[in-house]
Amino acid sequence: MIRTTILFVQILILIALSVWLAKEPGSVTVVWRDWQVDTSVGILVMAVGLIAVAITLSFRLWQFLTQTPGRLLTNRRANRERRGYRELADGMLALASGDAARAMKHARKADTFLGHSAAGHLIVAEAAVLQGKSDLAKERFKSLLEDQHTAVAGARGLLTHAVGTDDDTEALMLAEKVRSVDPNAAWVLPKLFDLQVRARNWSAADATMSEAIKRLAVSAEKGRRLRALVLYERGLASSEMSDDEAAVGFFREALDLDASLPRIAIEYSKLLLKSGKKRRSQRVLEQSWMTSKHPDTIKQLIAVTANDEPVDRYRAAQKIMSQNLDADTALILARYALDAKLWGEARKHIELTLRERSSVAACEMMAAIEDEEQSGSDAARGWQEKMLTAAADKAWVCSNCHANSDSWSPTCQSCGEFDQIEWQFPAALTESKTRLLPMQTVPLLSNS
Ligand SMILES: [Zn+2]
C-alpha cells in the first residue's frame, strides 16, 4: 500500500515536471565535431531519461544472461534434494507402519536423488530386518559403522542382530563399540551389563551397572540389587584366589546394597569367622535372619553359636526364633526339634504350620514322628498319603525356567539367566500340575 502510494506520487511529480518543462520557453544547442543539434529543454530531458532507461535495461539483460545457467543448476540440485528428502520421509513413514517393501522402494528412490545417504542405509537396513534379510541388514548397518556420525546407529543395529542370534562375543564387542563412540549412550548400559555378566567379567559389569545407576538407565532399586549380585561374585572370585581382604570388602558392600540375600551374609560371616571376628560374624547373620528368615541363615548362625549336640542346636534355634513364630519359621524350628528327637516340640511347631497352610515338609515330618512313636502305624501312612497332595514348600526356584535348585546362585544353572533364582513357593509348577489333572482325569472318567 505504501509502495503503491510512493509510485503514484513519483508519477505525479514526473507528469508535473514534464508539463512544466514543455511550457517553459528555452532551447538547447549541442555542438559536437560537425554535428549540431538544436532542441528544446523538454526534449533533452526526455532523451537523457530514455538513454538512462536503455542502459538500465541492457545491464539487467546482461545480468540475466550470465547468471541464469548457474541459477538453473542450483535450482535443479535443490529440486533433486527436495525430492530425495521427501522419499526418505516417506520411507521412514512406511517403516513406522511396518511396510518394509514400500520403505525399501522409497529408500532406493532417495538414493537416486541423494546418492547413498546415511538415512537411506538406515531405512534399507531396518526394512531388511523386518523382511528377515539379515545379510542385507548387516551390510547396511556396517556401512553406517564406517562414518563417525552414524557409527552408533550402525553398531546398535548390528548389536540387536548379534543379540538375536545369541552371538555373545560379537554383541559384547559391539556394545563396547557403542560405549567408545558415544559415552553418553545410556541405553546400551543394561545390555552391556548383561553381556559382561554372561562373559563372567564381574569387575567390568560392576563398573557398567554403577554407570547405569548414575545415568538412570535402570531403576535405583534394581541397580542396587544387580550390583550386589556382581559384588558377591567378585567376593567369591577374590576368595578363590585367597584374597580374603578384598573378598570381605566385596561381600560387605554387596550386603549394604541388598540385605535380603542370605548367601551373601553367610559368605561374609564365614570370612569374618575365619579372621577371628566371631561376634561380628554372628551379628551379620542375625541381621540377615531379621530380613531373610531363611533356613540357611539360621543353620550358619547355629553353626557359629552352638556345638554339634542336636539338643543344644535346637535350643539355640529356639532362642533365636521363638519370638514371632509363623508358618515358615515354625517349620524350620520343627526340623531342629526332630533332629533332637524332641517329638512333642516338633509336633507342636508342625501343627502351627499346618494351621496356616498345607506343606509337604510338614506332612513328611509328621509321618516321621508317628513312625518313631508307633512304628508302622496307620497315622504314619495317613501322613504319607497326605504328603502326595500337599502343597510344595518354599524352595530356590528360577522365575524364568521354574527349575528348582538346591542352593542360591546369581546365575540359574538350568537356563543361565541372571538374578532369577528366588526363595519362593513353586507356584507356577503347582499351577501347571493342577491344570493338567482335570484334563487327564476327564477321559478316564468318561471311559469308565
Ligand atoms: Zn532358570
Image (cartoon, rainbow, N blue to C red):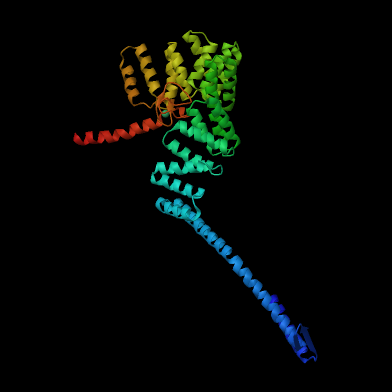
In the image, taking residue 233 as reference, residue 425 lies left or right, namely left
Residue 424 place in picture, x, y as percent? 45, 28
In the rendered image, the vertical position of residue 91 relative to residue 70, given as above or below: above
Q: Quadrant of the C terminus?
A: top left
Residue 226 place in picture, x, y as percent? 53, 30
Residue 195 place in picture, x, y as percent? 49, 31
Residue drawn 34% across the image and 13% down it: 371
Closer to us: 64 or 238: 64
In the rendered image, the vertical position of residue 214 relative to residue 106, given as above or below: above
In the image, taking residue 444 as reference, residue 193 lies left or right, namely right
Residue 60 place in picture, x, y as percent? 64, 72
Q: Quadrant of ligand 1?
A: top left
Query: Which residue is farthest front?
Result: 34
Do we see residue 238 in this rendering? yes
Residue drawn 48% across the image and 20% down it: 295
Closer to us: 333 or 122: 122
Do we see residue 9 in this rendering? no
Query: Which residue is farthest left?
Result: 448
Report how many numbered discs are placed on residues in the image: 0
Image quadrant in which you'd find residue 249:
top right
Image quadrant in which you'd find residue 224:
top right
Residue drawn 26% across the image and 33% down it: 441
In the image, taking residue 412 as reference, residue 9 lies left or right, namely right
Closer to us: 242 or 257: 242
Q: Quadrant of the N terminus?
A: bottom right
